């Protein structure tokens, strides 16, 4: 599908996920390495907190697939143990300690769930489009409460979430819009369920606030799409990097500048980015885990 661009030229619909849009906002150089450079530059070591997060998400998704009478807290714990991912931990002892904590966490969370309260979707992919963007993403859980849908996102990081986090999340707002369009039901409420603390951060959007998020997504997408087009049509590296060599950033930096800061220590591509290395020390792969 094509539309007329700003200069009257036919323009493709920009297909994206909320994650792609956020990556463009965070750092255009990281965006380029993640979505455009092929082959993709090798990433750094896997992160233990990602293993923990994925293990918890997988366990809770599998829990809802069990027959209703088997949806017990202990079953959630057993699923967590069975699917535990071990990448990124310092050693086996650290992995085992975190697994035990994570098991407690999902059992506590599952104890607060009503097994008969079937969600409308679990790990459900939803998509929607405007005349500028086609956006899709996967929702951790989609509940139906009364006449409305509710977007639920699980969080397993150290920091508790706030209503402001829920309000400001582009991803949650886009999921609410997409869910409403796909299932033809209103969806205004978005929730961040922080499993370590058991706290739930809630925001009730209005049609206007959802519209503002969608407009914002279109603005970000327009910038990223211009950059994508420049990458394809006029930016050329001077030479292909040899395996293990840093990519030559110079030809791209006017369009894809590095955006340095403390988050560079967490960037998967920091090893390829001299400016990012100067900005922040590399974090250990297990640095974001909760204290043992
Ligand atoms: S290290 Fe920092 S500046 Fe470099 S690509 Fe990653 S986020 Fe961007």
Image: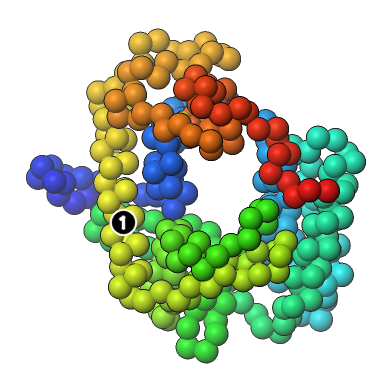
Q: At which x and y percent is residue 264?
A: 53, 33
Please tell me whether mark 1 sits on a helix, a strand or a loop: helix
Q: Is 6 on the left or on the right of 95, as rendered?
A: left
Give the residue displayed 45% in from the left and 66% down from the top: 167
Please tell me whether residue 213 is drawn above or below residue 16 in the rendered image. below
Query: Can residue 71 be seen?
Result: no
Q: Using residue 156 as the reference point, say whether residue 183 is left or right of it.
A: left
Q: Position of residue 153 (x, y in %)?
A: 58, 64
Q: Is mark 1 within 8 Å of ligand 1?
A: no
Nearer to us in this view, 1 or 278:
278
Residue 244 spot, x, y in % from top left: 58, 15
Colour approach in the figure: rainbow
Tell me if residue 108 comes above or below residue 290 in the rendering: below
Query: Which residue is at the front of the view, 30 or 129?
Result: 30
Question: Counting other residues with Cα less than 10 Å from the Cα at mark 1, is it few (<14), some (14-19), or many (20 or more)?
Answer: some
Decide: is 8 above or below 272: below
Horizontal relation, residue 275 to residue 67: left or right: left
Most extreme residue toward the left is 8
Q: Which residue is mark 1?
A: 216
Whole-percent x, y for residue 66 in the image: 76, 72
Identify the residue at image location x=18%, y=51%: 3
Q: Quadrant of the rendered structure where residue 193 is?
A: bottom right
- In this rendering, does residue 275 appear at all? yes
Viewer-proximal residue, 118 or 23? 23
Q: Residue at x 65, y 80 (%)?
A: 118
Q: How many marks?
A: 1
Q: Residue at x 40, y 19 (%)?
A: 249
The answer to which quarter of the image holds residue 45 is top right
């Amino acid at each position: 599908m094509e539309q007329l661009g700003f200069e009257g030229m036919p323009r493709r619909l920009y297909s994206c996920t909320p994650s792609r849009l956020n990556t463009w906002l965070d750092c255009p150089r990281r965006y380029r390495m993640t979505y455009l450079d092929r082959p993709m530059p090798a990433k750094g070591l896997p992160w233990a907190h990602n293993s923990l997060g994925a293990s918890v998400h997988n366990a809770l998704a599998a829990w809802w697939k069990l027959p209703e009478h088997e949806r017990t807290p202990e079953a959630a714990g057993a699923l967590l143990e069975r699917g535990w991912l071990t990448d990124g931990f310092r050693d086996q002892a650290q992995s085992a300690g975190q697994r035990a904590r994570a098991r407690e966490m999902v059992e506590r969370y599952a104890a607060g769930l009503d097994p008969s309260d079937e969600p409308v979707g679990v790990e459900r992919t939803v998509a929607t489009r405007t005349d500028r963007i086609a956006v899709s993403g996967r929702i951790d859980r989609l509940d139906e409460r009364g006449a409305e849908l509710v977007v639920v996102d699980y969080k397993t990081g150290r920091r508790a979430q706030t209503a402001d986090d829920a309000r400001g999340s582009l991803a949650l707002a886009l999921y609410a819009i997409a869910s409403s369009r796909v299932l033809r039901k209103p969806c205004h409420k978005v929730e961040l369920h922080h499993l370590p603390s058991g706290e739930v951060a809630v925001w009730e959007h209005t049609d206007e606030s959802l519209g503002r998020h969608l407009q914002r997504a279109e603005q970000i997408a327009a910038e990223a799409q211009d950059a994508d087009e420049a990458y394809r049509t006029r930016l050329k590296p001077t030479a292909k990097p040899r395996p293990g060599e840093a990519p030559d950033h110079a030809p791209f930096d006017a369009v894809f500048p590095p955006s340095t800061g403390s988050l560079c220590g967490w960037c998967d591509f920091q090893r390829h980015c001299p400016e990012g290395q100067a900005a922040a020390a590399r974090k250990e792969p297990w640095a974001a885990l909760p204290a043992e």
